[in-house]
Amino acid sequence: MVDDYAHGRRDGLRLALSVLAAEEAKWAALLGESPSWRTNAIREVRHKTLQVAQKRVQTVLGRLTPKDDPAADAEIARALAEAGL
């Protein structure tokens, strides 16, 4: 039961990473596109915020990963590759 719970938490974090990656890609495409400096500044802040959030989720995911389980390392590497990180 404990292993299933930990696996579920990692799955949730991977889902959060993929959502953050999609949002970051959306905002990255919009950077500098507006004629308004204020809009561009807001977009840059949102983009940076999403990057920081991704890094924080990656850190938590790394802390939840068992250090002695090579299968978990492969699982995380695959999930990060899918998210484009």
Image (cartoon, rainbow, N blue to C red):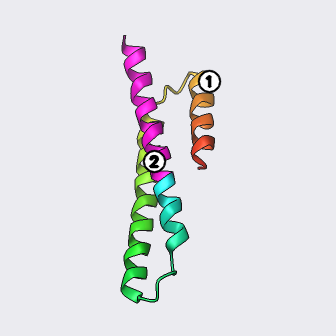
Crowding at dot 2, Cα within 10 Å, few <14 / some 14-19 / many 20+, comes out as some
Give the amino acid at mark 2: Val
Count of marks placed on residues: 2
Q: x%, y% of residue 31? A: 50, 75
Q: Earlier in the sequence, mark 1 or mark 2?
A: 2
Going by the numbered disc 1, the residue's amino acid type is Pro
Of 16 and 65, which appears nearest the observer?
A: 16
- Identify residue for label 2: 19
- Specify whether residue 84 is painted magenta: no
Instruction: Tell me residue 24's x, y (percent).
Output: 49, 60
> Mostly what secondary structure, the magenta segment?
helix
Of discs 1 and 2, which sits in the foreground?
A: 2
Q: Secondary structure at mark 1?
A: helix
In the image, the segment drawn in magenta is 1-21
Real-space CA distance between mark 1 and mark 2, rounded to the nearest whole angstrom = 26 Å
Residue under label 1, please give it.
Answer: 70
